[in-house]
Each structure stands twice: as C-alpha cells, then as structure tokens.
Image: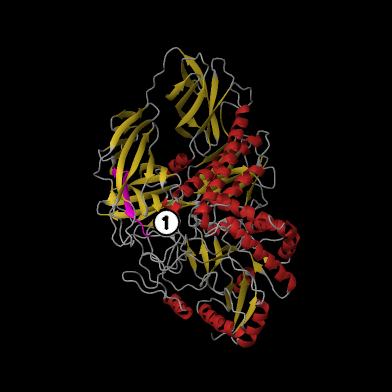
Amino acid sequence: MAKRYKAFIVSHTHWDREWYLPFQLFRMKLVKLIDKLLDVLEGDPRFGSFTLDGQTIVIGDYLDVRPEREGDLKRFVREGRILIGPWYILPDEFLVSGEATIRNLILGHRIAEEFGGVMKVGYIPDPFGHISQMPQILRGFGMDSCVLWRGLNDEGRALPTEFYWQAPDGSKVLTVHLRMSYCNAANLPEKSEEALKRVEVILRALASSASTSNVLLMNGCDHLEPQPFLPTLIEALNREIEDARLVQGTLMEYIQATRDEAPELPTIKGEQRSPRYAPLLPGVLSTRMYIKQENAKSQTLLERWAEPFSAFAWILGKDYPGAFLWRAWRYLLENHPHDSICGCSVDQVHRENLTRFQWCQQIANEITDQSLENVIENINTIEKDATSFTVVFNPLGWTLTEAVQIGLKLPREMGNFSIRGPEGKIVPHQVLSRTDGEAEILLLAEDVPPCGYKAYGVYPTTKEPSFSTSLKADGNTLENEFLKVKVKPDGTLTVTDKKTGKVYHNVNAFEDSGDTGDEYNYSPPQEDRAINSVNGTASIELLESGPVAATIKVSMQLSLPKGLSEDRRKRSGEETVCPITSFVRLCPGAPRVDIKTVVENTAEDHRLRVLVPTDLVTDSSYADGPFDVVKRPVELPQVEVSKEFLRIGEVLGWKMPPVEGRPEGWIEDAVPIYPSQTFVDVNDGDHGVTVIHKGLPEYEVKRTSEGTIIALTLLRCVGWLSRPDLLTRRGNAGPMIPTPEAQCPGKHVFEYSLAPHRGTYVTGKTYQLAHQFNASLKALQTEKNRGSLPPVLSFVSIEPDELVLSAVKKAERKDALILRLYNIADKEIMGKVKLYKPVKEAVFVDLNENPTDNRPLKVSSEGLLNLKVGPSKIVSVKLVL
C-alpha cells in the first residue's frame, strides 16, 4: 500500500426476514437487534450510523412489537444515524416482475420518507444475480449509484472495485462491487491488536483493486448486531495504521468520496449472472416450482386486472381501492426476498408464503370483479331481443381474438341460443356443459379492443346453431389455419407450421434426470440415469373437437428411480410410477398450441423437464425479463477468473481448489440454465420457435447435431436446504437442514404453449402471444343496463405493437392516471397512445411518479398522445383527464 487510503467502515446488518427459521422467530432476533441499536446510538454519540440493509419492512416488523419506540426510530433516521430504504424488501430480481420491483421501491421510498429520509443508493448486496434493466430502474427513482456482490460478469477483465453499469437503454449508474462480499469486516475483534492484523489484511486486499484512495469495509453480515465498541476500536487502529485512516461512514459518503476523485472507470453492460467470484445459485429458478406459479398468478391478477380496471372504474366515478391494492401488493412483496421466492428456506417458510399468495389473490380477485362490474354498470346493453349480455374484457394493449370461457345463467324455459356481437354477427360458441338454467361455454371473442371490452348478446333460437371455423380434429390430429398437430403413439407431438412448412418432431417429450443437489443448485449424480418418454407408450383420447377448441388427452406412466442410492452417487434401483397427463389444445385464430400437463410426482431427488426439439441452428436464445428481452449464448464462454481476484483470495486465505475440467478459481460452475418471465425463443432469423409458460421460469437451450432443443423445467425435487457435497458448487450455501417438502410430492399442474413463427420473436410477434397466454380474456354476464358507454370500447390503445403496456394505475399522489410502457424493440419508435376521452394534461414522470419535465406533452383534442421512445426504454406518463 504505497499511498494513504481512507477506509470507510459501514456498520450494518443483512436481514433475511425468513430463511433457516420462519419469520416470527427471526423477528424476535430483529427486535433484540434494534433494541440494542437504539441503546447504542442513545448512549454513544461517537457511534456514527447503522445501515438497516436497504430495507424498510424491518421497521414495521419491529414496531408491531415495540410501537413505543417509533419516535426514537424517526429521530435517528432524521439525524442520519439509522439508514433505511430505498427498498421495502431486498428482492430476487429475476423471479419477480419489473412492476413488482417498481412497487417495491415506491413503497420503500414512501415509508423511508415518512420516517425522515431515504438512503438513495441502489443497495442490492445479496440477490442471486442482477437484471439488465436495474440501472434504468434505479435512475427512475433518482439513484445514480449501486452496490452489489453476486453475479459480476467482468468477461475476464481485472475490473476495479468501482465501475459503471449500463442498462440496454443507455442508463448508467456508478457501481461498487463488494469485492469480498458484504461481510468483509464482520465481527471485528474488540481487542485492537487482534483487529489490527485482520484489518491490515483486508486493506491490502481491497487496495489492490481500488480505483481511488477510498476502500469500503462492511462491518456486518447476516443477522449480526451492531458492535458498540467500534468507535473506540477505530480510534485505536488509527494510532497503529500508517497508510490508511479509518472512519465510520455510510455508503453515500464512500460513493461521494469516489466521485470527488473523478477516476476514469470502465463500463459493463447488461445482466450480471456470472458465478466466477460469488455463488450465483441458479438452481433456485426451479426449486419449489409451485411458489413460482403462485407468484406469476398473483402478479398477473394485480398488474393486468385489479389495478387497470379499478383505474378505469375510478375514471367512471367509482372510488379507487388504493388501500386494498397496496395491502395485496404488500402480501406479494413479502414473498419476494430471495430466500422466499427462490424456495431456498425451511418448509415452514414456504407454507407461510402460500398463505400470503392466497391473501393477495383473494383481494386482487375481489377488486377485479367489483371493478369489472362497475364498468359494466356504465355500458348501454339495452336490446329488446337479447335475454342477457356477456361482456368480454381485454387487459392488454392490443386487440385480441381468443376463446374465452363463460358461465351463463339462462332462462329455465330457454332451449337453444345464439350469441351475437354488437355488429349483429353470430359468434361461434361451444357448449362445455349444460344444466337447467346454466351453461358453461367457450366463446370465440373476436377483435376485443385493447384495455377495453366488447358486449355480446344472448338470444333465443329455434334450432341449435352450427358454426364453421378453421378448426379440425380427428383422432390424434388437431388443425387450424396456422398449425397442424399430430400426437404420436409415444405421446410426443409432430407440429407443422402451415405458414412456413417447417415441421417440428418429438415436441412435448419428458426428460427426467437425478439431482443430488440442494435448494440452491442442481447437481447430477456421479452416475446418472436419464429417462426420456420418446419411444414409450401413451394413451391418446380426443376430448373435444370444436368449433372453438379441440383438445387431445395424452396419458402416460413414466417409471422413475424412487430416489438416490444410500451413498448419493447414483439413482436408486427401486422404481416408482409417475403418471403424466397432457391436455393438448388448439383454437381457431391462434398460432400456438396450448398444453396443460398434470404430473403426479412419486419420486424424489430428480429434475423433470419438457423438451421442444427444433432443427434450428443458432448460437443464442432470447428470453423475456423485466422490461427487456435478453439475448444469451447457447454455449457458455470459457473465461478464467482474473489473476487479480485470485491474488485477493490468496491474501484472504480463501480456498478455491482447482477442479479438473473447470476454470481455475471458480467458486461455482457456470451452467447454461437461465431465467425467463413468460417466454424463451430460438430462431435463425428466418424461422423460430417460442415456448411460452405460466410461472415456469427455468430453461436451457441445448445444441445437438439435429439442431437446438429447448428444455423447460417443470419440477426440481430435493430434500436439503444446503449440502456441502455437490459437484457443481464448492461448499455450503446455507445450513444443512432437511426440507422434505422441497421434494414436491403429489399433484402438479403446468401450463405452457408452443408458437412456431417466421423471422424473430419480434417480427413473429410471439411476445404478444406470451402476454395473451398469461393474461387471457375475462367475461362477466350482465342484465340489461342503461349506461352511457357503447357496447364496445377501448379505454386506452397503443401503437405500434413493439410498445408494450406495462402498467395502468391511479397516480399515488394525485387524481391522475399513470401509464407505463416499454419499447421491446432494439430501435427507436414513434408511439401513439389514444385515450377514450379528452386529456386535460399530460406529463412525463419517473418511476416514482415525479415529473421529469415541467413542459406538458401535446395531446390532440381526440385524446391522442405521440411519444418518441428509444430502444429498451421505459416510459411513464401521468394523465389528468
């Protein structure tokens, strides 16, 4: 250390709210910690500050037990001695939606501001990797800096501790890499002579990669309490250390000191998912898949239905249920920390997760039903011959033609009936069941306008109507104007894209392999035995044959090893039967084949995936993430750990033994396992295949001599929170606790879809199909109403298709409407937003809904707003109607 350094010691705790203990037991530890912290701050003015992990939820958790200490907390936050925010909870970034991340920061800012101040640093120390758009999201909340640990992808360069991180739209934040984790100065010895040896080692290691004369020591770790003797220890160390001056400081002070020296820093781009320097733990993408499915369902309900349609009902004069919406969001966000949504906690934690998901869904469903009924009250559905009306709602930003299921109440004397749209045209429907006074039907709802509705009348007829659609079904074959699907004797599908002539074979095969890993990482047995359903036998039954939907039921029994051998080196010789039933459906007008697969899981320690083989030759896959579609390599790049980092590890005494066949020094193996929100696509520029899913976020694209195969994980079943004996990771990732419920026994239902296309996912518009599959039409029946709205209406419409609507909600702090959109294309587009009624005022706002430009946007008298949106840009607009 040739020059003199300033060492900022940041006192903090990393607070996992639930993990190897359930929430209430960790809260008892939290109350003890904050009680002690308040005593320390009150008793020693020299103790500068303490960072509460970037979260605000811990404040509420504490005050539920100690409400009398609220004044003390607010005082210390105002004084800058307790730092809270900017988050409500520290989230996993890949398994939650972009809108959930924004609500998280809105709520975190609101609570922190109420208590006296927000820590304006994007502090994300422990999530398992980082999404590409995080820099843009942070800038959207007025934060121009970030502090992180896991996932850093330096592409083999020896990056300094500080650098710029750039999102796809060009947004940058000054980023600090916690080069030795967020625990590098945890549990400092109270005796200065012992502490001196350790601090000098840390300083030497950090100085070797510092870009300035400042270094960052993180005095804390998981669930650690403050060290009251720290001011005295710092004074003693400063008398002994010659080439550094230690101060108890904050992350903001460290970042400002770095900026003041104006170093020239490199820039990294995009998502950060490398396991070179810290475990990424990618197996969490599929651990306890039922958690991911419930999360996807909850997010869709809130973002696509409860928020937008309560906003439309509010425009029509109804009260906006803001308090209930935020209550539902809080329940959902409480499930979004990485130990929760990732499924890597003890079983009790995830039982409580399911309760929160249910609470969230109960509120969101009730708000949705009330809001849709409030809209229906305002529609004019007076038509003398109709006995009732069914109103079909579209939550997306483009026009939809799709089958929608409706429960109809009919006059008891009614025999046959037809359904007509506003233009008088009879619309095809399919009766699923009929009892006295009730019928369950599928309706082919055509051209339902964006963010709007279409009312269909129910009319009595003398004879049963017949319909002609493009749908055909015969034995083991389904066909519409886009696709032909044939079920083979082994249950796999041969899918023909009729528009391009491409044929895809062995689609919907099932592959099962052993898993000796834990809740964090998949790890194959040393002697694995994979089972594939190709060339097996299946039972095939045509369940329904149109005209609105045709479905084939495919049943098979997969014989799987019951578990692992006693030494866990291979799969057991004892077998168990795992029944798998797929319902393969095709509808007219839909260029995708929808599949619902029911699995009765009777095996343990295994991974079950569904395969979609293609003959496409490509180097990349494309998967949607929060506000982005990420391009990823099929083959992993071979990059060594930087020599500088290895030297740091050597100084610290880290043991990263070389493993034959693996890059030197890697803490965890890089694997081609990736996340997606709703779809993954492979294409060669001329043709492609998109696999769409509901809450099944883990995929792999494998290259074979016949082309690429998309593997979508359905189940990953393990019995331990963490184990030390994995082939894919060095050391434990948590305590070694049995988690039998992570074996996921019993019945599971998975929904996914296949969409062949011409060109790319953009030109083929299969990203739209992914949104439609996840947020399909809803229908409610109504009697005749004398409202003022027409029988067909779009509240909001958006052009072009590449401009994706992400949020419609009432503004947080004003009687105004918030629209959020993002550009899915890699080029600038001119967008058009049209509202159904005149707009009084329009202004751009940031993600926290603060104006970014005082100049109002121009809106035509017809309610048309023109927007120029750059590639991958997120845009929020506040509208006063």
The image shows residue 418 at horizontal and vertical percentages of 46, 19
Q: Which residues are magenta?
A: 506-516
Residue 683 in sight here: no
Query: Would residue 507 be counted in the magenta stretch?
Result: yes
Query: Would residue 657 be counted in the magenta stretch?
Result: no
Residue 866 in sight here: yes
Q: Quadrant of the C terminus?
A: top right
The image shows residue 116 at horizontal and vertical percentages of 72, 60
In the image, 488 versus 834, the foreground residue is 488
* Magenta region, main secondary structure: strand
Q: Is residue 662 above or below residue 737?
A: below
The image shows residue 108 at horizontal and vertical percentages of 63, 56
Q: Which structural element holds mark 1?
A: loop
In the image, 241 versus 874, the foreground residue is 241
Q: Residue furthest top?
A: 462
Q: Residue at x 38, y 37 (%)?
A: 591
604 left or right of 491 in image: right
Q: Amino acid at mark 1?
A: Gly
In the image, 815 versus 495, the foreground residue is 495
Total tally of numbered discs in the picture? 1
The image shows residue 534 at horizontal and vertical percentages of 26, 45
Q: Residues within 10 Å of mark 1 (few under 14, many from 20)?
A: many
The residue identified by callout 1 is: 719
Q: Is residue 257 above or below residue 866?
A: below
Q: Is residue 55 above or below residue 643?
A: above
